Image: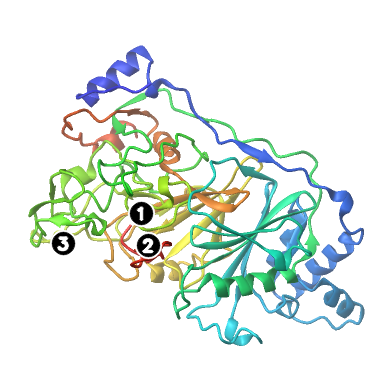
Amino acid sequence: MTFRVCNVRALAGILYLIGAGAAAADTFPAPRVATHQVDWTGIDTDLARVRAAISAVLTETGAAHFSQVANSPLPVLLPFDTEALLRDKLAEGTKSAEHYLSGFRSTGFLLSGPSGYDVAFTFQPGATAGFADIRFVHPIVINLSGFSFVYDLPAPAGRVESVARDLASEFPGIRRQILESTLRYSFERHGVPYVVSVQCYDAAHTFRRLSCKNADRIAQRFLRALRLAGGTPADAPAPLPQPVARPQPVSSVFTYHPAGSLIPGTGMKGHNGKPDTTVYARMRFPLAAAPAYANSQSFMHWGDCDQTGRRPWPRTKDAAYRCRVNSKPLVFNEAAPENYSYPWRDNFCEHRHFFVGQCPGGLGHQGQDIRPATCKLRNDGADRCDAYLDDVVAVRDGMILREHWHEAFLLYVNTASERIRFRYMHMHPGQMNQSKLLSGRLVNEGEVIGKLGNFNRRENGTSYHLHFEAHVPTRDGWVRVNPYMTLVAAYEHLIKARGVEIMEPDNEPEASSGHQEATSSKADKPRKKSRKPAQKKKRR
């Protein structure tokens, strides 16, 4: 139940007394999943011998992380020449780990756990016969995942699927598709769903943009190199995800708009957001301290309106303007009080030319933006916040996937009842390299892993905020979901009080400041004439 009100504090008091409405719900809904039963009977009887040989050789040759393959409750497939390894082992002539990886290189990332495994490799086309024509600025990352369960989501918008006839004989039922700027091959083996994926663009190849046509050549080589490399049958099936409980006290200040309720006019092509109330994980809030403010970076004060147009064009601090898509009054000052006030506002699926399968129409902002408690201006004439003053923390125990050239990273979580990964963006790459926030690093929930920033391809490339995403596995592989309510639940546990969900009144009330909260409760523009927008990194 939701309420239309003008006095937020009064609403909080009413709900506290009568125990009704959104704030009175004791739990948030858990996601729905579909489980898979492994067919171990069809697996090679020499699996134990293969697994032991791979673990021993890779440990001896400096790739000890591959010993995790034995921990997977699923059969582990890797691009590993097990026949050559066993042959060399008998001859006592084993070589380095890379020699057996069919031209692919380990990133140091392999996370195996109760719900399956994830692994990442890189491929350098110029160093491999038959691929020298693929000129690319960095080694290309290939991801492989095996899932014991997948999340049951609505069919994604914008998916481009084709028949993979050239692989059908080796992988019966294999599916090839492009979704969220990623080429994906999905198949089942031994009753288990696997997905191989490579990020790409369904457009012409450039030095910095891998075309999906060239990604397909690399993915096919990877698929044909896959061999059974490990796995151990689990004693019991993994439990299903559970609802997340809410604190009993009700906050007097923390309020939030419903999931999917964007700032009016800021959706893509007339759509609103994604009204997904699911809480996908029990997690720690990603900023170290409260208060924090989830809201739009593009359509709030100082925002660029995501190239939908501003009128008039602001050029000086505190100059008044608005975005052409609505009548909301704005000022050219990133420190404007409304930017650092409740209520929160969902901006997943907000106007962006990025592919997002769970957004109406298939395009939109890929995550949720979060501001810290305050904005420190360098001087009286400044209109921008100083960066790198607030701590960012790991939301769960997990493993990092990030190559040193990336300005974003993924945190993978693999537990008995949750399989999820989180994407953080706008921290400084140099700082992340110095702190060794790189592929294979294990982090603990609540651990400080960096500073909030404004990096987006360059220093000061965006506003001062954290861009935060949540991805879950489906039959189509990892896809983005709305993280908004997952963040609401995490924030409630941080401040130890429930927020109050409100509906926008006919006349927008003055936003309430929440600076006392901490003490009171100790992303591409489409090319012209193109049916498939190609993504560019823009301010998120």
The residue closer to the viewer here, 7 or 217, is 217
Vertical placement of residue 523 versus 236, above or below: below
Q: Return the residue at label 1.
A: 466
Indicate the amino acid at tag 2: Met
The residue closer to the viewer here, 295 or 481, is 481
Residue 107 image offset from top left, x and y in percent: 60, 70
Gap in angstroms between the C-alphas marked 2 and 1: 8 Å
Residue 521: image tag? none
Q: Return the residue at label 3.
A: 378
Gap in angstroms between the C-alphas marked 3 and 2: 19 Å
Q: Nearer the viewer, mark 3 or mark 1?
A: 1
Q: Please give the name of the residue rendered at 51% of the width and 30% of the height, measured from the top-left corner.
A: 29
The reply to whether residue 111 is visible in this rendering is no
Residue 427: image tag? 2
Label 2: few (<14), some (14–19) or many (≥20) C-alpha neighbours in 10 Å = many
Label 1: few (<14), some (14–19) or many (≥20) C-alpha neighbours in 10 Å = many
When asked about the image quadrant of residue 185, the answer is bottom right
